[in-house]
């Protein structure tokens, strides 16, 4: 179980790095991103091979370890730019209620207290958060259909796609990219998947190109919920979970991982290639439109939503 | 309290004691990124010492003649020339910014008949340049796959053999080294030798691939050995044995349990270099907290030293440092959690003939030499 948490955390961090790399001076660094993709693959494999999928953690989170410093970037490395997307989007609805930080990865974190540099975390949290909240609105509207093409295009330069529900269940009821088996989302009112699918579906990511099939992928993350994608993983080390309720479960949205990876990493998707057999299809006949409601009240558990954030925001920004 | 260093000096063979000699660079706590030193290199005689920085500037220091009236002071290095070597550029066609950071400085071998140099700024290709033909180069290694989705490794370092001008090596992000002979074919995609140590399955982690990526490869002066630096260790290879290194030296093994945090803060991607002393009896590489490590290959001893302003009194001896890895911390030891990961020594250079070392600590260049007895 600890490995799974660790894997989840590492996947989040890795995706954050890939996102950050787009804004780095000198362009995307091939070597570093290659290594990050290797870590991503390892973590994903561990997660999927974990014999206890879908378990929820009970109880309250462990407090942050004393002396665990912020794992910000070392000084002198240059700060990643804030998400470029912020300014253009209209302010829409109120930000969803969610704690600033997830996750019990720290509870299960096998790593000892970080030996991290003392450099301050360069979160541009406030403005980034606001930007992502603004993103939320249009995404909601886009759920279940073509959405607002302009907004979708802004967020997902690959092209408009059907929105994906925050719970990861694709709006259209299909998930051709679908690839990674996700643990059953018990509270999700989408039709439950057969249990065996989730164990037997091989890890899969598409080498599917962006723009293929209108479904899945892009806007999955577009329902970002006010998390800064840039420093989210680093925040894990330094902040207490905002609410005691924060960690009753540790549910990773692996359905999104496939999409994320397929969007991000055409360069490296050879490492993450879908195995023969393909991914699973989402059950059909899902409900539509819960997204129109407030973000906090859609079909999935809040904790799932929270866990979505690093992923979803990473997708969008990328 | 002897420092390591072995018999680097021709007159040496005794235990060395390293002493502070000089430090160059500003003292400011606030370091501008452009001032961060990105490469350090002695020339072939050791009389010239060059540094390059992230701002594209090159500074060349020249060693002063020894002062007869001050017999205990060896020649100091003073600035000989400074110039802006590279400016930031923007490739409008590809919409790419080209960094002005100086990646590597190599001095021309004045006595060497070879007039070629290798350039490996590209992760996927190695080009060979003739020094008199500046408008084109020969591509001798190309590992770019037809389909970039199949990319699994990149080239991380390359170097010519010091004596056989047709032989070079290049290292990869997978922890392998390939030795190629340019006489065998024009395109050296096929190697003559392939150096790889089998992975230890018991130490496998999420980060195994990252920490096995080789950040530097250096031939020994003799040309018989080469040294590779990965994240946690330095390995010495006999060119005649491809299956495993002949020596492995742990640089900072205590970081193995911290890899996740080091991944998070990007330190795990730091590319440390390594260097040989003139007689190949000792090797040196950097670490964090402005520590650097020396390994004496003959005596098997190693020492950790620190480049710091506090230890910068003229001719002050460097005290060996120790990192406490667990249990009770002794006096003068520093615990792993107290290490400053912002202060990293990535670049070091050893004078080709004497026991003089240049150590780049962010924006400062420290020069140490052995005490003259």
Image (cartoon, rainbow, N blue to C red):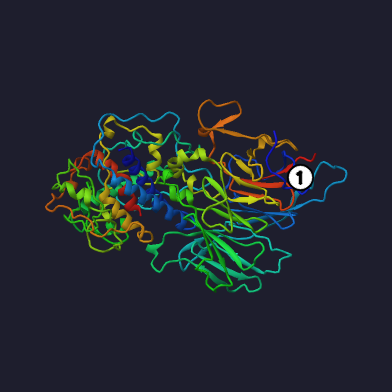
Vertical arrangement, residue B193 with respect to residue B200, above or below: below
Task: Name the side, left or right, on which A281 lies relative to B152.
Answer: left
Circle 1 is placed at which residue position?
A: B12
The quarter holding residue B133 reads bottom right
Residue ID at (31%, 43%): A226
Q: Mark 1 lies on which chain?
A: B
Q: Which of B328 and A251 is in front in this view?
A: B328
Coordinates of residue B351 in the picture (x, y in percent): 71, 51
Left or right of B21? Residue B207 is left
Could you tell me if residue B107 is visible in this image? yes
Q: Which residue is drawn at 38% across and 63% down?
A: B150
Q: Residue B251: x percent and y percent?
A: 56, 43
Q: Is residue A95 visible?
A: no
Local SS, label 1: loop
Q: Position of residue B216 (x, y in %)?
A: 56, 54
Along the viewing direction, whichever of B368 and B277 lies nearer the viewer: B277
Identify the image quadrant of residue A10: top left
Q: Residue furthest left?
A: A285
Between A252 and B177, the residue placed more toward the observer is: B177
Write the residue at 24% across / 42% down: A53
């Amino acid at each position: 179980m600890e490995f799974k948490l660790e894997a989840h955390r590492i996947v989040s961090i890795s995706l954050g790095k890939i996102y950050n790399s787009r804004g780095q001076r000198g362009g995307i660094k091939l070597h570093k991103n290659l290594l990050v993709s290797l870590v991503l693959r390892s973590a994903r494999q561990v997660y999927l091979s974990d014999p206890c999928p879908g378990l929820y953690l009970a109880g309250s989170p462990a407090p942050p370890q004393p002396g665990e410093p912020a794992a910000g970037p070392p000084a002198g490395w240059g700060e990643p730019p804030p998400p470029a997307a912020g300014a253009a989007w209209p302010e829409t609805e109120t930000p969803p209620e969610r704690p600033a930080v997830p996750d019990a990865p720290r509870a299960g974190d096998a790593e000892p207290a970080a030996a991290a540099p003392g450099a301050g975390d360069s979160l541009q949290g406030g403005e980034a958060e606001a930007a992502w909240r603004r993103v939320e609105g249009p995404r909601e509207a886009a759920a279940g259909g073509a959405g607002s093409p302009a907004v979708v295009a802004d967020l997902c330069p690959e092209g408009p796609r059907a929105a994906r529900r925050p719970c990861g269940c694709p709006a259209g009821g299909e998930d051709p990219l679908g690839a990674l088996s996700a643990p059953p989302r018990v509270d999700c009112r989408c039709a439950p998947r057969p249990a065996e699918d989730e164990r037997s579906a091989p890890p899969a990511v598409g080498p599917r190109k962006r723009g293929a099939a209108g479904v899945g992928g892009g806007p999955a993350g577009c329902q970002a919920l006010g998390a800064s994608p840039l420093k989210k993983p680093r925040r894990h080390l330094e902040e207490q979970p905002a609410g005691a309720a924060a960690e009753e479960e540790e549910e990773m949205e692996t359905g999104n991982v496939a999409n994320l990876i397929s969007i991000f990493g055409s360069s490296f998707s050879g490492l993450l290639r879908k195995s023969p057999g393909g991914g699973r299809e989402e059950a059909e006949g899902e409900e539509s439109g819960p997204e129109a409601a407030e973000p906090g009240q859609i079909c999935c558990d809040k904790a799932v939503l929270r866990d979505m954030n690093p992923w979803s925001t990473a997708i969008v920004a990328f | 309290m002897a420092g390591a260093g072995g018999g680097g000096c021709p007159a040496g063979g005794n235990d060395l004691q390293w002493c502070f000699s000089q430090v160059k660079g500003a003292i400011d706590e606030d370091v501008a990124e452009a001032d961060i030193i990105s490469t350090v290199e002695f020339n072939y005689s050791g009389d010239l010492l060059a540094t390059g920085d992230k701002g594209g500037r090159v500074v060349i220091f020249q060693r002063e003649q020894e002062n007869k009236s001050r017999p205990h002071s060896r020649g100091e290095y003073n600035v000989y020339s400074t110039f802006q070597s590279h400016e930031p550029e923007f490739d409008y066609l590809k919409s790419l910014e080209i960094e002005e950071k100086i990646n590597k400085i190599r001095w021309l071998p004045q006595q060497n008949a070879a007039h070629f140099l290798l350039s490996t700024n590209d992760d996927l290709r190695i080009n060979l340049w003739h020094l008199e033909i500046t408008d084109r180069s020969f591509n001798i290694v190309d590992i770019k796959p037809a389909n970039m989705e199949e990319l699994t490794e990149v080239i991380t370092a390359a170097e010519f053999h010091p004596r056989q001008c047709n032989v070079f090596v290049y290292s990869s992000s997978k922890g392998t080294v390939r030795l190629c002979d340019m006489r065998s074919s024009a395109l050296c995609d096929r190697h003559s030798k392939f150096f790889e140590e089998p992975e230890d399955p018991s130490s496998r982690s999420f980060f195994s691939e990252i920490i096995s990526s080789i950040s530097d490869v250096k031939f020994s002066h003799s040309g018989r050995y080469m040294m590779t630096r990965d994240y946690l260790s330095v390995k010495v290879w006999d060119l005649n044995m491809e299956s495993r290194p002949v020596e492995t030296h742990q640089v900072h093994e205590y970081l193995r349990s911290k890899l996740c945090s080091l991944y998070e803060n990007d330190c795990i991607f730091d590319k440390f270099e390594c260097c040989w002393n003139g007689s190949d009896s000792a090797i040196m590489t950097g670490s964090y907290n402005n520590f650097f490590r020396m390994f004496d290959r003959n005596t098997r001893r190693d020492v950790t030293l620190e480049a710091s302003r506090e230890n910068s009194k003229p001719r002050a001896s460097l005290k060996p440092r120790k990192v406490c890895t667990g249990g009770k911390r002794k006096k003068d030891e520093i615990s792993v959690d107290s290490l400053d990961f912002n202060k990293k020594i990535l670049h070091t250079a050893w004078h080709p003939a004497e026991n003089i070392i240049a150590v780049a600590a962010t924006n400062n260049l420290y020069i140490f030499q052995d005490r003259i007895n």
